Image (tube, grey):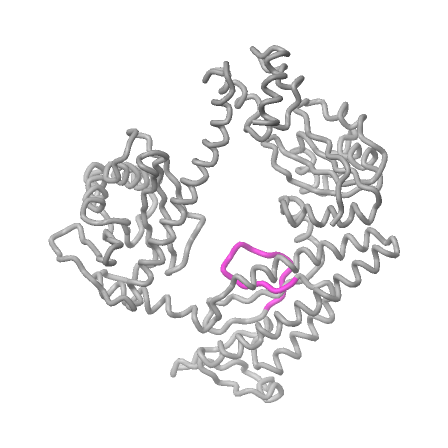
Amino acid sequence: MPNPQRLLVATHSPDLKEKVRTLPEGPGVYLMKDRLGRIIYVGKAKSLKKRVSSYFQPGRARALRHQPKIRTLIELITDFDIIEVKSEPEALLLEGKLIKQWRPKYNTDFTDDKRFLLVRLNAEDDMPRFTLTRFRKEDRSRYFGPFAHSGLLRRTLASMRKQFGVLLGDTRPTKLPDGRYRLYDDVRAELYGWPNEVAAAEYRTRVDQACAFLDGKSREWLEALRTEMKERAAQQEFEKAAELRDVVLALERTLERTRKFTRDLTKLRPNDEALRSLQEALGLEAPPAHMECFDISHISGTFVVASMVHFTDGRPDKDHYRRFSIKSFIGNDDFRAMEEVVGRRYRRLIEEQKQFPDLVVIDGGRGQIAAALKAFLKLECPPPALIGLAKKHETIIFPDARAPLNLPLDHPGLNLLQRLRDEAHRFANTYNADLRSRKIKESILDDFPGLGEKRKATLLDHFGSIDKLRAATAEQIAEVPGFGKKFAAELHGFLQHP
């Protein structure tokens, strides 16, 4: 792995052009940052000074009026870092490593915008088809690729259709009265050698086999691309090597997602069974397609936070997750905290005229569900279906006169509730841990004598975080109002060796 020789630490000066003038002429990697200090683009350069200065040339934005993403990137840059290296090949490898580490937004966008094809499979369809696309969406589909050789990919898919009897994007199956599907309305079924009428479950078995085959092909092509990338770099064809490197990184990300995609297609449908069994067990009018669960997390009454997770059709819907800091009181009171966050959540939905979920689940027993019910009473609105899940015996608690319910531990509906509750618990604990970590870092300043709360707040407001304060020089600390050179030098030394 390349060893960077020198990191130019970003300053907080707004004059980027002055900073560019001090850049070295040699090779290296540059990291563009936005106003929040986030790395938004990583690039390599034969000459750092020439390459980085090109971003700030007069009229550059006008010249890029037909390339809106690059123009937007340039407009967002407020600072940058550089890493000097010895050679272009070293810069190429380091750039790839940093893109993989940071996954900057605009590197991802540019990679996705290339001409490489992806194979998309909507796993939730009754009869999934393998289709080609150039853009990856944040949906529940499974993606394979990207693939640099479109001709080879199309031949592979044609061979896969014959070998496994799966559908590509050139046809849509027809559902028959008996519940089976007719794959084709023409003679192609005879040519491909598979029965033209098939049950959905049997067809999904074929799709599983085709996915395993395509995964294997992806890994074969990944090794071939790595080899070609190294050969191009050795021949000093750096632009081609960088292009192949982008494909390698994107394909590695896809295969990483595939490893995490542990449920095969034959296991996707049991969610329907779980929702129906939950409907029956709870006496609901319909399967609860939308469910929300609340959990409170704290450590001995400190760092009290709450989480709310949302499941759609039995699966996590993270776009609708919410985190809450407790605002109405300080201390340890789970019931009061639950009343606050439930009230805040559904007051917001009422104000925005949005639908309530089909089922609300509270992590806890009688006290917690009474607190949630109290929140709805204060809102003067009837609650949706509402239950508590007490963890000790996985007992379902109702807010009315119904007796507590204990379902068999292998009951699909109970298992779904457990997944929902455990996800809320994980999400709350993650937020709690983030707050504790942030507080521990900030508390380092408490150990420096003579630094009161007001001056500590001034430092954090100026630098944004302890990490950025540690990276600052004594001279930069002295620029903060109220800090002299001597005090700044002492604080700088303390932060380097706390």
Is 493 placed left or right of 4 in the picture? Answer: left
Residue 140 part of the magenta-drawn span? yes
Q: Is residue 413 left or right of residue 463?
A: left
Image quarter in which the C terminus is found: top right
User: 99 or 440: which is nearer to us?
Assistant: 440
The magenta stretch spans which residues? 131-145
Q: Is residue 128 above or below residue 298?
A: below
Q: Residue furthest right?
A: 235
Q: Is residue 18 left or right of residue 278?
A: right
- Give the farthest residue toward the front: 497
Q: Nearer the viewer, residue 229 or 384?
A: 229
Q: Is residue 447 magenta?
A: no
Q: Quadrant of residue 349?
A: top left
Tell me residue 399's x, y (percent). 17, 50
Q: Residue furthest left?
A: 401
Q: Residue at x 24, y 53 (%)?
A: 390
Residue 493, quarter of picture: top right
Eyeballing the image, is 484 above or below 275? above
Q: Residue at x 80, y 26 (%)?
A: 22
User: Residue at coordinates 36% horizontally, 58% vertically from top-left?
Assistant: 419
Q: Position of residue 271 (x, y in %)?
A: 37, 66
Find residue 392 and report its horizontal and vertical position in percent: 24, 55
The image quarter in which residue 143 lies: bottom right
Residue 63 in the image: above or below residue 417: above
* Residue at image location 71% in from the left, 50% down from the top: 96
- Decide which of 147, 132 is in the foreground and name it: 147
Number of marks drawn = 0
Task: In the rendered view, tell whether residue 444 sits above or below residue 272.
Answer: above
Where residue 297 appears, as percent x and y from the top left, is 34, 42
